Each structure stands twice: as C-alpha cells, then as structure tokens.
Image (spheres, rainbow, N blue to C red):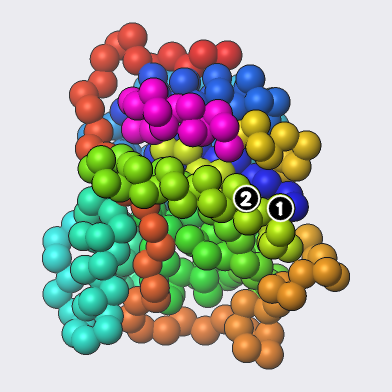
Amino acid sequence: MPTHVSIHDVSPAWAREVGAALALCRAAGVRPALLVVPNYHGQAPLLEDASFVAQLRLLQGEGHEIYLHGLTHRSGARREAGSGAGRLSWLFAQRVVSNGEAEWMGLPPEEGERRLDAGERVLREAGLRTDGCVAPAWSMPRWLLPMLAARGVTYTEDHLRVYDPAHGRSRVSIVLNWASRSPARLLSSASYCRMAEQARALLPVPVRIAIHPTDMHYLFLRREVERALRQARGDFVEKGSQLLQPDATSPVWGALTPGGSPWRVHKGDGCPGHARGPEARPRHPSDTKLPR
C-alpha cells in the first residue's frame, strides 16, 4: 500500500534534527513532507531566519510538500469553557498524547481562524506554498475540517485517517510514530511500529511514517526509523493526496461525513490524536543550516 513520509515540527529551533531526518529520508530515496511551525513555542519565528527559509524554498522546489503545522505548536491557557467529554478530550490531548502541544484543542473557532490566517501569512511571506495543513499533536477540534474545506485545503490528517476537506473525502490510514518522553513510551511505540510494519502487508490501507525531531536524539529510534523506511521501499508516495486516491479493493474509503453531507461548523472538540511534544532547545547559529 502507498506510504507517505513526513517530518514534523520543522522550525529553526530543530534545524539540526530536521537535517538529520532529511538525510535518513534521502538515503531511503524519498522526499518527505515538511510540517512547518511558523513560530515554534513562540521562541523561533520562521521569518527571522533567512537562511532556514531559503533552504525550505529550495526543498519545496525539489518536490517536498510544505504543510502548515499550527502557529506555535503550543497550547495556551487551560480550557475555560466546556465540560464533560469536551473537557476530557482537551485534557487527554494535552496531558496524555502530547506535552501541552495540542495547540488548537479547546480554542473557539474565531481564535482558530485567526491562527490559521497568521500561519498561512507567515508561509506566504516566506515564499512557501501551503500544500496542506496538519493540526499539532494530530488533535483536530470539530471546527477545523469545515474551516479547511472553506479554504480549499485538499489534505490534512489525524492519528487515524487522512482527509481531503475540500472534496469531502477521508480514508483510514496506519501511522508509524515514535515517542520518547519516557523509556516506557519509547519501547512501547517502537513495538507498536514493528507490529504495524507487519500489518501493512495485510491491511488494504495507506501508511504514514511520521518522524519527529527528538527521534534523532536516540540511536535506537534512528535505527527504528531507518528500518521503517527500508520496509516501505517501493511503496513511497510524495504527495499526501496520493493516499486519498480511491481504491476499489479497500473497504475503508468513504465520505468525510455520513452520506457525504457537507461539513458544518460545530462547537466543542473532536477526538485528539497521538503525538508527543519535546521542548524546543535554544537555537545555536550552527544549527540553522539543513544538509542538502
């Protein structure tokens, strides 16, 4: 089945790690999508690093897709509105599946739209084309899909599915994603990914390999990423939209909403995805160049 590779949290704050991940992908013969954060944790404004921006433009020119990945990739104040399931979803997204990085969970639609506008504006001023949009920590509030559809966005994803909001389609997808916040998470996520590698040969669903900067801090995880890339050789696709191409043999292809009804904006939050959020380390001048 088709396999799409992406590097998350692309920012000057993680330039060295992003460069290492690009090198692994280049060795495997794939151009990963780059999930760019305009101002990672409010500490690494993309537009203030001209060299990093220039390299992103070159990479996009070579065929790498650029996806908007939040504005800061950091959750703000605790959720003030809502209760019950919505409150639990917010807590789960911020405390369990991320380290307070599910930026859009708990935001009202108006604030979410402001952040989308701001993020798109940064990418535009950087001379980058926005090829898609992926919520930080894969945690999508219910207002996000209708908002992306209204903007004509044709690719997004969460932990369980890939979506074409503009055309009202979605598809189940396996994602390989490693976690390193604790030894237990590291080992359990590696075990899951190995099992998923075996399942991908049996299940008629597309696969995503998601690489995060902190994966490059551990030799064990670097080798696991290399292993996953080797296993996927021959199945790579370089555009997220290729995961959404209809497949008559797949029972998990369908419309975004029951009956294919148009998207509507809802209040409250949807189900969070799975990710973990490393703290940005201070930038160093030598860190801002991506190997080519």
Residue 94 colored in magenta in the image: no
Residue 115: x, y in percent?
36, 56
Q: Which residues fall within the magenta stretch? A: 214-228
Residue displayed at 23% across by 76% down = 88
Question: Taking the image as drawn, is residue 119 in sight?
Answer: no
Residue located at (49% from left, 33% from top): 224
Foreground of the two, 153 or 117: 153
Residue 266 screen position, x and y as percent: 42, 84
Q: Is residue 249 visible?
A: yes
Tell me the SS state at disc 2. Answer: helix
224 drawn magenta: yes
In the rendered view, would you say 218 is above or below 7?
A: above
Q: Is residue 22 above or below residue 111?
A: above
Left or right of residue 200: residue 179:
left
Q: Which residue is mark 1?
A: 201
Side of 64 where 276 appears, left or right: left
Q: CA distance from mark 2 to mark 1?
A: 6 Å
* Amino acid of disc 1: Ala
Label 1, residues with CA under 10 Å away: few <14, some 14-19, many ≥20: few
Query: Camera-side residue: 229 or 128?
Result: 229
Residue kind at label 2, given as amino acid type: Gln
Q: Which residue is mark 2?
A: 198
